[in-house]
Amino acid sequence: MTLIEMHMRIECKCHGVSGSCELKTCWKAMPTFREIGEILKDKFDGATEVRVKEVSGRSELEPNKQYFKKPTEVDLVYVSSSPEYCDYDINSGSLGTHGRRCNKTSRGLEGCDLLCCNRGYTSYQESVQERCSCKFHWCCFVRCRTCTRDVTVHTCN
């Protein structure tokens, strides 16, 4: 059974005069893309590294660490650790994070603390040109000014 099948739900709609439910139509509805994404993210965060073990002529997955429970059919597992993405590594295809822009205030994946791999980051000012004071002229074009503003940019060391 797939993840989508496991999270299908019944939706119904009533038909009738002024909202009465003389006839009810029901169907199975797939979960939203966001719901599936959240479920997969949870499974990814809880994924276990496993090895293949031969038992009575059958292959079974066994956790690499004894204190993890045996994975079920719906658990997400992996058989080898991810490469170190912080540093340049031609073998894994990783360009590393040196010089990458990061977000100083974010606690997410793009945040300087995580993205820069505890190497710190450098901050500098940069002038950015952008469209501003845009006005629609009848008919049919938009005229804008070009404004310059200074922004602080953070890049990984």
Image: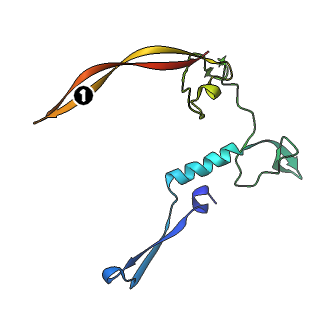
Residue 49 drawn at (x, y percent): 77, 40
Residue at position x 69%, y 22% in the image = 118
Residue 22 drawn at (x, y percent): 38, 85
Residue reaching furthest bottom? 22
What SS does tag 1 mark? strand
Q: Nearer the viewer, residue 133 or 27?
A: 133
Q: Nearer the viewer, residue 65 or 144?
A: 144
Residue at position x 27%, y 20% in the image = 146
- Classify 144 as above or below 52: above
- Classify 111 as above or below 121: below
Q: Quadrant of the C terminus?
A: top right
- Classify 117 as above or below 11: above
Residue reaching furthest left? 139
Image check: 143 left or right of 70?
left
Residue 103 drawn at (x, y percent): 54, 27
Residue 131 drawn at (x, y percent): 28, 25
Residue tagged 1: 133
Q: Quadrant of the N terminus?
A: bottom right
Q: Nearer the viewer, residue 135 or 141?
A: 135
Determine crowd level at label 1: few under 14, some 14-19, many 20+ residues with C-alpha closer than 10 A: few
Image check: 65 left or right of 136?
right
Q: Quadrant of residue 15?
A: bottom left
Colouring of the image: rainbow
Question: How many numbered badges does the structure rendering display?
Answer: 1
- Classify 136 as above or below 57: above
Residue at position x 85%, y 45% in the image = 53
Q: Nearer the viewer, residue 117 or 53?
A: 117
Image check: 153 left or right of 75?
left
Q: Amino acid at mark 1?
A: Ser
